Image (spheres, helix red, strand yellow):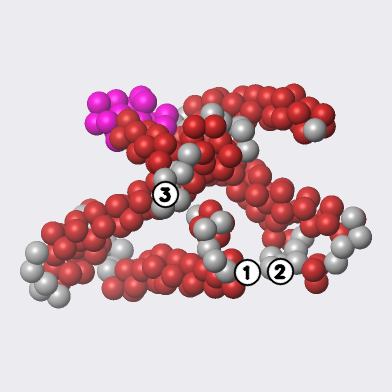
Amino acid sequence: MIAVGAGESQNPEKTVPQSIKHTLIILVILFIGTIVALGSILPQSDSSLAQSPFVTILSNINIPYASDIMNLILFITIFSGANSGVYAASRMLWSLADKNTLPKGLAKLSKNGIPVYGLILTIAGGLLALFSSIYAPNTVYLALTAISAFAVVFVWLVIGWAHFNFRRQFIKAGHSTSELKYKAPLFPLLPILVIIICLLSLVGIAFDTNQRIAIIIGVPFAIICYIWHALVYRKKDHHE
């Protein structure tokens, strides 16, 4: 998400490192901090853990409409996540179309610089996924969620490998890391760790009967995309 937004930033050299730090701090506070707080307040034997622990805490301190408040917060959170997904997906479609990987029409921008057709296609796909959760929750929607999980893990696997290979090739070409505007810390340990964790996650997905469909569909699809790119686009670049 940060990388996608960097393309529309006026000063990515400054804003991207700041965004990474701020995002990390926010995630630590929201996720780890919340878990620590809940674990400290609610006893493990509390029967009210069957419902939302947040609702339980708010109810215990006599805050009225606790469940309604939490539902509103959850709705805003989900809407925010969906909005971020639409933003990132529409920009990715534009980027792929701009590189002639997808139909050129998806690269069309409005006068405000918004990828209109990519945005429409993203929203349409999101609505179809939403309808599948209502009309086919145990088949289509389950497969979509599994494939989404696979896609996230696979993308991070590629990111780790791309970063590792980029730094190696950059140094091999006679450059120095001092030339880089931003240097990811703990190289090469960090990308290697990312690759290992992602591979272990893929193994875990393969052993999960509910998620295995993602491997069955995702791996062949990724291989086909790679072969197609190698045969068509690399050959085209070579001729140019």
Q: Is residue 140 magenta?
A: yes
Badge 3 marks a residue whose secondary structure is loop
Residue that carries the numbered disc 1 in the rendered image: 13
What residue did someone put label 3 on? 111
Q: Quadrant of residue 232?
A: top right
Left or right: 81 as drawn, with respect to 49: right
Question: Which label number is shown at residue 150?
Answer: none
Residue at point 77%, 60% (across, down): 188
Instruction: Tell me where the magenta segment starts and ends, as one range.
Output: 130-144
Mark positioned earlier in the residue sequence (2 or 3): 3
Answer above or below: position of 91 versus 138: below
Q: Secondary structure at mark 2?
A: loop
Q: In terms of depth relative to the viewer, which is nearer, 89 or 143? A: 89
- Separation of marks 2 and 3 at Cα, in angstroms: 31 Å
Residue 181: give its label. Answer: 2
Residue 44 rendering spot, x and y as whole percentages? 31, 63
Q: Quadrant of residue 182?
A: bottom right
Indicate the amino acid at tag 3: Lys
Residue found 54% across the figure and 32% down from its top = 104
Q: Residues within 10 Å of mark 3 (few under 14, many from 20)?
A: few
